Image (spheres, grey):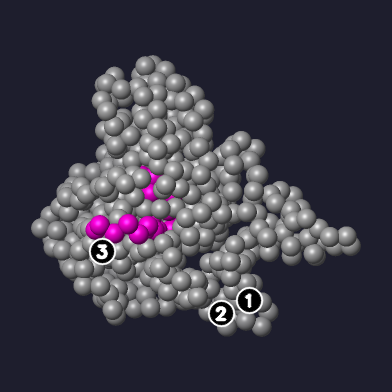
Amino acid sequence: MSDLNKLGLADARDALRAGDVTSVELTESCLKAIDDADALNAFVHKTPEIALERAKAADERIKGGDAPSMCGLPIGIKDLFCTKGVPSQAASKILEGFKPEYESTVSQQLADSGAVMLGKLNMDEFAMGSSNETSIYGNAVSPWRRGNDDAQLTPGGSSGGSASAVAADLCLAATGTDTGGSIRQPAAFTGITGIKPTYGRCSRWGIIAFASSLDQAGPMTKNVRDAAIMLEAMCGHDSKDSTSAELAVPNFEAMLTGDIKGKKIGIPKEYRMEGMPAEIEKLWADGAEMLKAAGAEIVDISLPHTKYALPAYYVIAPAEASSNLARYDGVRYGRRATLAQGDGITEMYEKTRAEGFGHEVQRRVMVGTYVLSAGFYDAYYNRARKVRNLIKKDFEDVFAAGIDAILTPATPSASFGLGEMTEADPVQMYLNDVFTVTVNLAGLPGISVPAGLDTQGLPLGLQLIGRPWEEGDLLNTAYALEEAAGFVAKPGKWW
């Protein structure tokens, strides 16, 4: 078999079980693809020795006949996950040289299931960004191009390296994290599948924190079945994370029947944004028709507090970031600035943070510190928390009325060119999260499924939002949508 790196998780697993291929062969195919794809800047710390060692161990395990679904499958790990003995920088200068002495729970669970780590993936610094342009490693680049245009496009953010690597077949799947859309937006931009599970479904232990009440890990894969397989390996209760749910993890793959007859799918009127491109509007309408043709009932619904979601998110997330990032002070680990004669601890903090944090991280820390300050706490942070509760209640009311899932666009546009959104107006960039942040504020599961191409040949995604803890049901609805949409486009190889 040639082009083994182009396989998805399910197909590769079946080939491994049948003895048609070995994990070492799969891994070598991916490692070659990675070495040939430096132009994408997706992999920022390559770990070929670890990969081949794990692949050999996986082959032995498969021969022994006790291998779980992920055994022997080569994947990439976002640089936000701490990986023992391997640089884990969150794409920031301030964590330069940091090699953890421990493994994040999610990456450990994947390793325990026999998955093969190929290396660490590019991302926005501390997961703050929607275009992967805030990384100390430089921009991650999408494998997609607009028509015959050579302009480099964003793979989305913050999990841009993960999205680029999966779309370009450098790995079979990758981990991502989602604080306000950082799995679903890049998945939509690159024509892959990405699911953010219910808050608490995956442990956050060992994942470098951005906003602790919003962050959640999830898989980024080539299709819905692969997402179901990888999500099961990533989930589970963890006593080291107090927000981790003590719930049994179902066999998500077994729930993919494609039968959604009688399911009620809500279409929220508040997501019809002013100035929304006609292509996104049409894709959304087409998606609803596809689900209707599959036997679902389409119901118009209202989520009245949606318009407050983005402002509330951009108060809560920076507030939590300013608290979480206070630990980077140059004292215990990571980078420390060179100090002048007579400098004290205050100067060390100031110089280290000024050197170590990029502009976007500095901006959000400043905003967060401001909204938490004594005179503004009630006016901003407390009010944002109240709005968050109202947004959560909107969803609870809709689900209580019998809605099984909600269909929305995943992004307000297709991928844009690197450098096209200027730093002069960060709010323009923040608007990329308009359809995704509500899901994080309410702690719900959401999935992005590729559903079509725009007029320039770029992928567009649809988002499905599910009931809390019902990822299996959500994945099944996504599976039906995927079957109906029949999206098979791949980027032409230019790198």
What amino acid does circle 2 point to?
Tyr
Amino acid carrying mark 1 in the image: Tyr
Residue 462, image x, y percentages? 26, 60
Query: Magenta part of the protein: which range?
Result: 147-167
SS for dot 3? strand
Residue 419: x %, y % from top left: 43, 65
The quadrant of the picture occupied by the N terminus is top left
Residue positioned 16% across, 63% down in the render: 286
Q: At which x and y percent is residue 481?
A: 20, 54
Q: Which comes before the other along the chain, label 1 or label 3?
A: 1
Q: Which residue is mark 1?
A: 370
Task: Answer yes or no: is residue 146 visible.
Answer: yes
**Viewer-proximal residue among 328 and 353:** 353
Q: Residue at x 63, y 76 (%)?
A: 370
Residue 380 bears which disc, if any?
2
> From what the image shows, is residue 73 above or below residue 150?
above
Q: Distance between the Cα atoms at labels 3 and 2? A: 30 Å
Counting residues from the start of the chain, the first of labels 2 and 1 encountered is 1
Label 3: which residue?
407
